[in-house]
Image: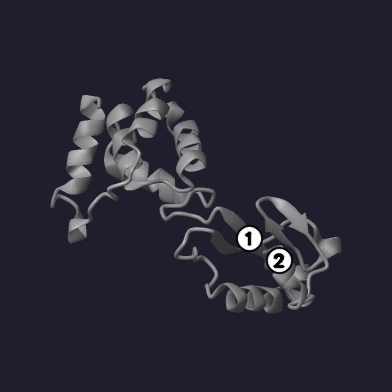
Amino acid sequence: MSRLIHFCHFLVNSDYFVGNIRAMSQFDFQTLEDLLAGTPTEPRHLLPFLQRTQEKFRHLPREALLAAAAHFSLPASRVFAVASFYKAFSLVPKGERLIAVCQGTACHLRGGPQVAASLEKRLGLKIGQTSADGRYGLESVNCLGACALAPVATVDGAVRGHLTPGRAAELL
């Protein structure tokens, strides 16, 4: 394990962080080290690194953000600011299957809120949550650009249109 990763592991497992947050014992430091290994240290490479990291872990783990701060010689606050600014990034794990329900004007008027409520009930989740087993994530988006198919949702990026609360179960 590199000194950088070792240092991040120490920080995450120390009482240094607010609330005495502990790293998950199954965190894959080797994957994190591999992601950093091919990444130049100039700060302009932060966003691509965060994108690859989220793709790998389905969120941006605290360990990765701390490692990025050290790797790019940036304050941790700057890395956390970037990670929390962009809606595409998540600081909490997303489900293996991500369902995004459109709440744009056309979808809203044609039953989008009822479709979302049906999915919440069926999954036992609220918008923005991930199931305890990590299988499903449910989120709301402002517009998917498929107004003619309203109401719509995406499942792992694939658009499904003309939904009704009854048909929402087909998304699972």
The disc placed on residue 25 is none
Residue 73 in view of the camera: no
State the image quarter where residue 38 is shown: top left
Judging by the rendered image, the residue that carries numbered circle 1 is 99
Question: For this rendering, which residue is in front, 78 or 101?
Answer: 101
* Residue drawn at (57%, 72%) of the image: 123
Which residue is nearer to you in this view: 166 or 161? Answer: 166
Quarter of image, res 119: bottom right
The residue beneath circle 2 is 104
Note whether residue 74 is visible. yes
Measuring 73% from the left and 51% from the top, which residue is drawn there? 158
Q: Secondary structure at mark 2?
A: loop
Residue 56 in percent (x, y) is at 48, 39
In the picture provided, is 118 more to the left or to the right than 55?
right
How far apart in space, not on screen, are marks 2 and 1 (Cα)? 15 Å
Q: In the rendered image of this protein, does residue 169 appear above or below residue 33? A: below
The image shows residue 136 at horizontal and vertical percentages of 56, 61
Q: Residue at x 22, y 53 (%)?
A: 22
